[in-house]
Image (cartoon, rainbow, N blue to C red):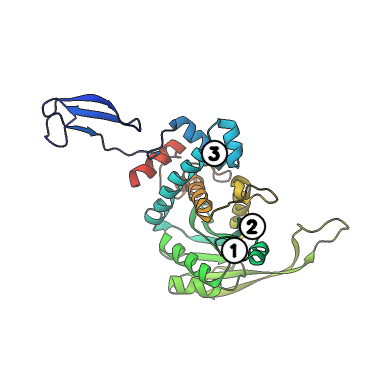
Amino acid sequence: MIAPACKHNQVKRNGHDRNGNQRFQCVLCGQTWIEDKPKPLGDMRIDRYKAVLCLRLLLEGNSIRSVERITRVNQNTIMSLLETIGRRAKRYWATKMQNLPAADVECDEVWAFIGCKEKTRQRKGYDERFGDAYTFTAIERNSKLLLAWHVGRRTPTETGIFAQRLRQAIDGRCQLSTDGYGPYATAVPYAFGGQVDFAQLIKIYGGPVKDGSNTRYSPAEIMSVRLHSVCGYPDASLVCTSHVERHNLSIRMEVRRFTRLTNAHSKKRENHEYHLAIYFLYYNFCRIHGTIKTTPAVKAGITDHPWALDELLDELAIQD
């Protein structure tokens, strides 16, 4: 090792700083320093094994308090860990998940809420940080790679933001399918400059299924389906949203914040986005997909092997 100030190579260890980092000292000039290297957990002093265990439990559908009971790690420490890694994950999405290979893309949105339901927010006069929180997602049909995501309200403005993120994430022209949500018909052609083969799958629903039981959570019956070509030359045989809708189910099962009829919902929008940023990277790089038998990143040719969660944390630290 070389001393950074005097460039001498006569160096010895000199204890640790208050965060447990190794300190070094030059024997000749007395200069002390800490080696500048990536810190996967930032300045947190939690044991790395326990940190990885906490994250794995969160990524497999456990709530914050459930993780606290299993690991005996204080919930405030778990929240700090989620914030530290989540902030890095969001930066990684913004800088590295660009120009991804995609041929057949499907988009959809999945509902959740933050703090309270939308009708309660309106009744109590809370600001728009609370209430409905739709997660827009786009996956590549063949590799199952998640290309882009955005958390916001189901409005034309938020749809436009998501479409712009998707355009930045995709390399070249692709076929794109969405459901019949109206703002997609304007937002997608505008974001892609018309350079996309885009069609919508419009489902016509009837009333809920009635069999004499409680139908509050029963899906409405699909009466008919029609295709609407918006721009480009979409292949009608490929227009589909089934794969992204199945992915919505994975999100709802594996991110506790999306579980209905519980109190595990997000209380702050920032934490909601941090958790999703980590989960989507974990999904792309670490989680073996049941259909393709590898990770989406390997299938898409982004990496040559599935990453362990440790490896993902190291990569986030390097890019940070």
Helix, strand or loop at mark 2: loop
Residue at the right extreme, as displayed? 212
SS state under label 1: loop
What kind of residue is marked 2?
Cys
Residue type at mark 3 is Gln
Q: Which of marks 2 and 3 is nearer the N terminus?
A: 3
Of the two numbered discs 3 and 1 on the same chain, state the one appearing first in sequence: 3
| Residue 281 percent across, percent down from the top left | 47, 47
Classify 10 Å Cα crowding around label 3: few (below 14), some (14-19), many (20 and above): some
Q: Distance between the residues labelled 2 and 1?
A: 9 Å
Between the C-alphas of marks 3 and 1, the distance is: 26 Å
Write down the residue under mark 2.
116
Residue drawn at 38 percent across, 53 percent down: 96
Q: Which amino acid does label 1 sit on?
A: Tyr
Residue 231 percent location from the top left of the image: 51, 75
Quadrant in the picture for residue 121: bottom right
58, above or below 152, in the image:
above
Tell me the residue at 25%/34% (across/down). 34
| Circles 3, 1 touching at the beta carbon (< 8 Å) | no
Mark 2 or 1, nearer chain start: 2
Residue pointed to by mark 1:
126
**Of discs 3 and 1, which sits in the foreground?**
1
